[in-house]
Image: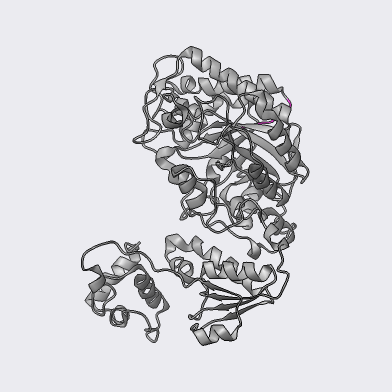
Amino acid sequence: MKNEYKHIFEPFTVKRMTMKNRIVMTPMGTNYGEQTGEMSFLHMNYYEQRAKGGTGLIIVENASVFSPQGSNGTTQLRLDHDSFIPRLYKLCETVHKHGACIAIQLNHAGASAQALRTGMQPVSASDIPSKAGGEIPRPLTKKEISEIVVKYGQAAKRAQIVGFDAVEIHCGHSYLISQFLSPLTNKRIDEFGGSPENRARFAKMVIEEVRKQVGEFYPIFVRISADEFLEGGNTLEDTLGYLQYFEKEVDVFDVSAGLNGSIQYQIDANYLPDGWRSYMAKAVKERYGKPCMTMGNIRDPKIADDILAKGDADLIGMGRGLIADPEWVNKVEFGDIQDIRKCISCNIGCAGHRIGVNRPIRCTINPAVNTGEDYKKLRVKRPCNVVVIGGGTAGLEAACTAAEVGCTTFLIEKKGNLGGLAAEISKIPDKKRLADFPNYLIRRAEKLKNLFIFKNTEATVEQVKNLHPDIIVNSTGSSPLLPPIKGLHDVIDREGGKVSSILNMIQLNECFDSGETEIMNIGDSVRARRIIEGTEEARNILNVLDKRDFL
């Protein structure tokens, strides 16, 4: 596999740091930190799993350079005091022993901080909230700006002392430096506002102070929102213009996109294709000749390798992909890419619940975010029969896990195919990424010799008893929710009716796409037949299907 994706496995050197491959774990908050801002040992386990998995460079989530004013959460890491050095030092040692490089992102949240958590009004370039309905910040004074600049430099020096191989300065995603750079949030009339040069002044001061503190041989990464994707915000061309004011001391540009108001392009929506942002990294690289990192739903190693081969970017950033499967790199290098547990970009445990309700990071498709495959060491000590009823994703995960720890496992599925609702919903064009998870589970199940799968089989009490179960797992699944509209249940999916559920619409679409009149074993066969026959009603239905309005 290594030869097939040779560009991924080329070493990369910047200043005095050499990465063994081109895969970078991008910084993503975890809510694993201690309330004091210290790194927890849970944290260390999390990053160690990705280092063991073969990742070339791990960029640790954003650390506050000035708390509580610049805090980005109740459990955010801090680098604004020497007391945080010991555990971060331990982290660096832990990651280095697995051959990975490690950096840390430096940040001040600005208007993205919350008074409820910090006990003070947020600060920013101007009195413009960082998102619709957000708290109104107060504009920073020039003296305060200078003080924060020094804080960045001091934090970078601590990172160097700790043993981090590089630092990244966060200049995007609606945090403080981004709030100065964007015309949407910077309405100042002094030397820090107005023209692109003035709006870039704060970033320039921060980067120059960091360089002063860490010296000329220490790598500095800078993350930018190359296109803010908001009306009146910075476009890619605008960004290419203002980078001239601070690019000199930057070693690598981490080319991201989006602000709080366009978060679907910052935390990529699942319908966006692998590597969709790479054109932005290419533009920055061509303009300034600096190494660039791209990211954006990159799950397929071939696409990652092609981006590198074309020279559109020098590094491939993966955040959620490595949360879903910390062994992504090792599987590409030594194994089979079909064994990768590809992120489905659902953005639930890693983003929605973590950001929205302050929970620790979780993953919909990886139940062992911190511990990896350590559960396989916990083998059963006596014979154990497990019967799993239902072959959807939950049932497959339960059956595989039971078999992997040594149980004789029986999976009973009444339909002729596995994967359940996830497999069905993935037939919607914009949801096709969902299919990666059931496909991964099916392949995993097929390789287990002590897992016996019965399809087209309705589970009965007698049948289950005959399998002599010690454990029975009920995973018979769920049905899509319907809106609470009066009378809906009386008309939906009725023969000759005009209201279809999402599953019925999928089946109708499959029937039409197949072109086979024999395939009529679906909920509304009369309407399906009309589609094939081409009646006036059929043409109306086809028009809906073609436009995908039913999505």
Taking 494 as reference, is 89 above or below it? above
* Range shown magenta: 217-221
Q: Position of residue 547 (x, y in %)?
A: 33, 63
Quarter of the figure that contains the N terminus: bottom right
The part of the image, by quadrant, that contains residue 87 is top right
Quarter of the figure that contains the C terminus: bottom left
Q: Nearer the viewer, residue 445 or 3?
A: 445
Q: Nearer the viewer, residue 11 or 106?
A: 106
Q: Residue at x 61, y 52 (%)?
A: 369
Q: Answer yes or no: is residue 165 visible.
A: no
Q: Answer yes or no: is residue 167 visible.
A: yes
* 497 with respect to 301 (left or right): left
Q: Position of residue 59 (x, y in %)?
A: 64, 39
Query: In the orientation shown, which residue stands out farthest toward the top?
Result: 143
Taking 160 as reference, is 443 above or below it? below
Q: Magenta stretch: dominant SS?
A: loop
| Residue 323 sits inside the magenta stretch | no
